[in-house]
Amino acid sequence: MKIKSPAMTITENKVAVICRVRPALNSSPHSPDSITVASQTTINVANHRDPTKQIQYSFDACYGSKATQEEIYSSQVSELVQSVFDGHSATVFCYGVTGAGKTFTIQGNDSHLGIIPRALNQILKKKNSSKGLFEVKMSYYEVFKENIYDLLREVDCGPGLPIREDSNRKTYVAGLREELLSSFDQFKKSYSVAVKRRRTASTKLNTNSSRSHAVLVIKLAMSSASNSAVIYGQLNLIDLAGSEDNRKTDNNRERMKESTAINQSLFVLGKVIEALNSGAKRIPYRDSKMTRILQNSLGGESKSMMIVNIAPEESFLPETHKTLNYATKTKSVINKESIIDHNTNYSSQSTFNSSRSSLLSNKST
Ligand code: ADP
Ligand code: MG
């Protein structure tokens, strides 16, 4: 059944969670009923412990295996990119186990362009039609075992780049290359070199690229006329490391260290999204490298989206439930008490707003 998901309006502060089920791959056995997209916002997944039962999960939007790259982009992502032109930050994460379709969704291939080339196309078109200043800068790095490697340079096996704070206590990666982009062709060239480098880097680092997070950052500086104020916007597009519990299959010591780092950073990301979505006072940005770098882009008036990628094959079912439970936990919980209790609500909201203001004052991220 093909269900068209709605274009979504994201409420301020919230991280939208959308789910995408990829088509079954020819080579693998697939039971067609193990996952069904039941409505625009719900999916039903067979219970791997009791196949006669199904568990329903609900998200901001759900896409079945027939959803195209174009459909996902136009109904979910282009509005986020549009908000960057107004001086906001926007972030898209793809979360899921290895093989679930994260790289396909965020990067795509030559015949099925993913979110990254589509976003760059939208941005560079806007740049070409703009009469004032419109500067587009790209950086691309990976986070592996809590170390940051620049993918726009040759990757060495050293300790990686440090995170520093500027005088406004805003975090940045020191020494990261930023490339000024003037055309889509230029972007394509640099990006494809960097994508290849991600693969060779994983060989050098003696691992698999699915064990690193890849973060593409696009920074915009815009003004309508040469003497008017400059507006800064930022877009982060992130292919997260596979969320499977690698410890089960490989007890090599190095792999254990990698798994611990992956599990920790995905755990912290989940906590950050959960805290943002429930309006918590303390957001644990500092508990992992990636959330620390993205601190200025998550929360505040930033718009963020987590795309949860799901594989339909039965062999993935136990991990699929884990993935969907993780994503469900990050959703906002609006309970009646907090609505009735105006005082509590007001004070926590105002503290949250003041931390938002301080984030916004550091806006030139
Ligand atoms: P991940 O990055 O999560 O490990 P990939 O994006 O590499 O997973 O996807 C695994 C395989 O499935 C790849 O061969 C990819 O081309 C294919 N694939 C994933 N999603 C889709 C989709 N929506 N439509 C067609 N093929 C897909
Ligand atoms: Mg991948």
Image (tube, rainbow, N blue to C red):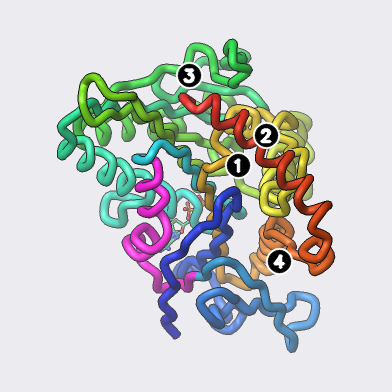
Lateral position of residue 324 relative to residue 252, left or right: left
Q: Is mark 3 within 8 Å of ligand 2?
A: no
- Look at the image and give the residue range highlighted in magenta: 63-84
Q: Which mark is residue 155?
A: 3
Query: Which mark's residue is nearer the viewer, 4 or 3?
Result: 4
Q: Residue at x 16, y 36 (%)?
A: 128
Instruction: Name the residue carrying label 4.
Output: 321
Specify the amino acid type for callout 3. Answer: Val
- Mark positioned earlier in the residue sequence (1 or 3): 3
Specify the amino acid type for callout 1. Answer: Gly
Q: Are marks 2 and 1 in contact (CB under 8 Å)?
A: yes
Instruction: Name the residue carrying label 2.
Output: 355
- Mark positioned earlier in the residue sequence (2 or 1): 1
In front here: 160 or 252?
160
- Mark positioned earlier in the residue sequence (3 or 2): 3
Mark 3 crowd level (few <14, some 14–19, many ≥20, 10 Å Cα): some
| Percent of width and height locating residue 77 | 40, 54
Q: Residue at x 55, y 20 (%)?
A: 172
- Mark positioned earlier in the residue sequence (4 or 1): 1
In front here: 359 or 3?
359
Q: Residue at x 69, y 59 (%)?
A: 332
Residue 162 seen: no
> Quick check: 311 above or below 137?
below
Specify the amino acid type for callout 4. Answer: His
* Distance in Å between CA atoms under marks 4 and 3: 36 Å
